[in-house]
Amino acid sequence: MKLSLESAELYIPDGIEESAALARTTHLSVAAHQDDIEIMAYDGIIQCFQQEDRWFTGVVVTNGSGSPRSGIYEKYSDAEMVQVRRKEQRKAAMVGDYAAQFLLDLPSSAIKDAQNSAPVDDLEAILRACGAEVVYTHNLADKHDTHVGVALKLIEAIRRLPAELRPKKLYGCEVWRDLDWMTDGDKVAFDATEHENLQAALLGVFDSQIAGGKRYDLATLGRRRAHATYHASHGVDATTGTNFAMDLTPLVTDDALSPLDLVRAHIGNFQAEVESRFGKLGRV
């Protein structure tokens, strides 16, 4: 596959031929940085893990050169960190039994530039080659500019496709902003109960981030456990781990719908729920 940068990489853990590896994809995750996939798209990974008829492919859009670092990584240059993070993402793809892992190696500036079509071109090519039914990306209320930028580039790429080639489901998932603020009727709750050992292993391979100063492993597993308990106030826990997502599928089926308007609708529903509770308590 021809991608915009010569330095881009496609890694296929089981080594089968490229077109066959991609065509078997049923679940796809498009993420900004190395380890974002494992934080936000565990539902897709576990849906496909050790399954013959379901396969997960990951896409990391940026090179990750600007990540914070300390400890043994403190003096690593940006170029050295890029190579470390690439190696870690390949490890995760092997541990998670992925069909394939793309590393597009783009700078964050390309994602934040609304006029730069290179990321969209790459994502369109990947979508066409994979034909995934379910796609996971960042939620549109995330507080990281690059995360939201990736989601917007992905939506643009999907909208280039004819209806029959578009994914059936598109989910915006949690990384740099939880989605517990959304009303229960709006949020999608993914069960992250199964294979806690696999969850820990997938997060644990990113040593440059964990030993480098960010305990994403503990934070991610803790958030999943907290969501499971706090999701319902009047019932026992239905799971031991839960991920929340924003359903972005309306943006796949309706090209006239603005991504910002979709987020505004969710914010409006949250506001209405809060105001309604005050009303019930006679405090308006």
Image (cartoon, helix red, strand yellow):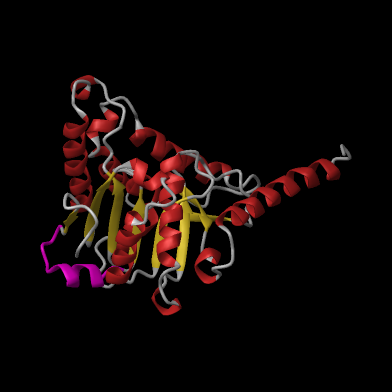
Q: In this view, does 69 lie above or below 271?
A: above
> How far across and down, in percent of the image, does residue 4 sit?
24, 56
Residue ranking furthest to the front: 115
Q: Residue at x 28, y 32 (%)?
A: 209
Q: Position of residue 152 (x, y in %)?
A: 46, 54
Q: Where is residue 231 in the image (x, y as percent from the top left)?
A: 57, 46
* Quarter of the image with the C terminus in it: top right
* Residue appearing at x 33%, y 55% in the figure: 119
Name which residue lies at 44% across and 61% down: 156
Q: Does residue 256 lie above or below 10 as drawn? A: below
Q: Furthest-bottom residue in view? A: 164
Of residues 267 and 158, the one nearer the viewer is 158
Q: Quadrant of residue 86?
A: top left
User: Can you say which quadrant of the picture contains the N terminus?
Assistant: bottom left
Q: Is residue 280 visible?
A: yes
Residue 65 is situated, as x and y percent measured from the top left of the image, at 26, 35
Which residue is at the front of the view, 202 or 147? 147
Which region is colored magenta? 13-25
For this rendering, which residue is in front, 4 or 276? 4
Q: Residue 82 magenta-drawn?
A: no
- Please state if 26 lies on the left or on the right of 148 as rendered: left
In the image, taking residue 260 as reference, residue 135 lies left or right, namely: left
Q: Is residue 14 magenta?
A: yes
